[in-house]
Amino acid sequence: MSSDVLVSRPHYDSRAVALGAPEKNPPPEVPQPSSGSATAGYRSAKYTPAEWFSNYHTILQQAGTDRYEARSIQRESKTLYQDTEAATLQTQAEGTRLLGERLQDIHCWKSELQRHIEQLLADTDSLLALKTRLEKALDATETPYAIATDNLNCRARRPGPDLVRDSVEEELLKEVDLIRSVQALLKRTTAQVVTQIKMNREAKQTLELDWSDKNQAYNFDEHCGRYSNMSPDTQLHPSSATMHDQVCNHTSWTKFTQDNLSKALQEEQASNSLRTLVERVLLDTTEDLRAQCSGVDRAFSQRCVELVEAKTKLEMRLAQVLEQIGSQERNIVALRQAIHNKEAPLRVAQSRLYLRSLRPNMELCRDEPQLSLEGEVRQIDATLASLQQQLSEARGSLSHLEESRMALEKDINRKTHSLFIERDKCMTHRKRYPTISTLSGY
């Protein structure tokens, strides 16, 4: 038999301690036997049979209870992980489905954004082409303006009475005013086109930024949709599940894109209206300029006809005057000759009268020959006076005819010079007038 003294040990519930239950009051300490008591006997340090059975049954009962609790926990755990597994798979499937729907929504909005971006790009390109046409049309108006002002300057050099404010000058002044108003209109229209191009580009940039964000979000969501429980690149991100205060909701997200598309649609409509306006402006200004050009050309043609007709009449009258001058000169020569021819008869008659005045005494009588000679002298004197008067009148008429000739020649020269300005300079210069396609900006 061993000489070791058996002492009772305090009982601790290790399971309760593990679960965090408060520790039971330990049993009172059994006094340690001294070396003297060991020699005295063994009874004081041993359990009784009743305590042994009690301890034995307590252990059995506790083991049974733990076994029952373990089975209950196992059943609950099995049910829990089966339910949570199904719920997790269902939730994951729902999340995958929602991601798919979200991808469809993003794809639809991306397509709509892309369509409007392309439309804005096309509208901007068409407006840029119209801007180029407007600039070319504006440059093309410089030629008509230079032609009209040159015509006015040339016609200002018309000589004398031909410097008249006629229908041609009125039409030219109308043309100058029309060209200036057309230039102002084209400048204002060009400024509107430039402003609209800027607004289109701003709207296009907004849509492109929205499209870029949606494209990035689409790629992220598409990558999320490919994640599965077997994916090797998944990680735990505990903070990603927290709700962000600054994040927008689905309604504001949709409204943001709708607002952008609405703004883009407004710019598209404005671009269409502006394109129609520009086309109409170019058409109207071209028609107005060509119509005024035709009016000026008709006025020039009419003026040239009038000048040619006036010049023809002047030339015909000059020919008549020259013919009359020749006749008058011949008449003057004839009158001079007639006066000269009267000198001999006058000398004869006067000589006869002189000699007969030398008759002596009673022979110096006024007989019939004397009376005849005196009448002859008076007749010749009257004839010479009449011829001299006629010669003076003929010389005055010849002087007037010469003045008329000079006036006709000067007026013919003026008409010739005016006709040269109208037809050879102005109308020839107007052949450089821009065509309809040039005035339209092509």
Image (cartoon, rainbow, N blue to C red):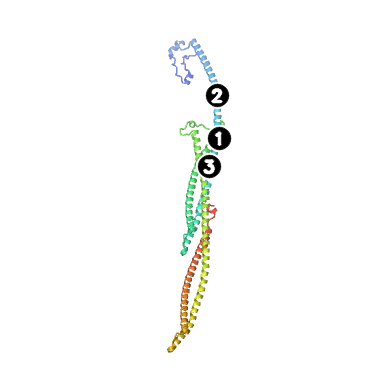
Front in this rendered view, residue 408 or 190: 408
- Identity of the amino acid at label 1? Gln
Observer-nearest of 322 and 201 = 322
Residue at horizontal 49 percent and vertical 82 percent from the top: 345
Q: Position of residue 392 (x, y in %)?
A: 46, 75
Helix, strand or loop status at disc 2:
helix
Q: Secondary structure at mark 1?
A: helix
Q: Are marks 1 and 2 in contact (CB under 8 Å)?
A: no
Above or below, 316 relative to 233: below
Return the x and y of residue 79 as percentages of the image width and height.
55, 22
- Secondary structure of the residue carrying numbered label 3: helix
Which badge, 1 or 3, comes first in the chain's sequence?
Answer: 1
Asked whether 332 or 346 is in front, the reply is: 346
Q: Are discs 1 and 3 less than 8 Å apart at CB?
A: no
Say what amino acid the circle numbered 3 marks: Ile
Image depth: mark 1 or mark 3 in front = 3
Instruction: Give the residue at x 50% y 35%.
Output: 254
User: Horizontally, is 367 left or right of 108 in the view?
Assistant: left
Q: Is residue 32 visible?
A: no
What distance separates the C-alpha of mark 1 from that of mark 2?
Answer: 31 Å
Sequence-first disc among 3 and 2: 2
Alpha-carbon neighbours of circle 2 within 10 Å: few (<14), some, or many (≥20)? few
Q: Residue furthest bottom?
A: 360
Q: Position of residue 422 (x, y in %)?
A: 51, 62
Going by the numbered disc 2, the residue's amino acid type is Asp
Residue that carries the numbered disc 2 in the rendered image: 83
Residue 174 at x, y = what percent?
48, 55
Residue drawn at 55 percent across, 29 percent down: 94
Identify the residue position indicated by label 1 in the image: 104
Q: In the drawing, what numbered circle is on residue 117?
A: 3
148 and 113: which is toward the camera:
148
Q: CA distance from mark 3 to mark 2?
A: 49 Å
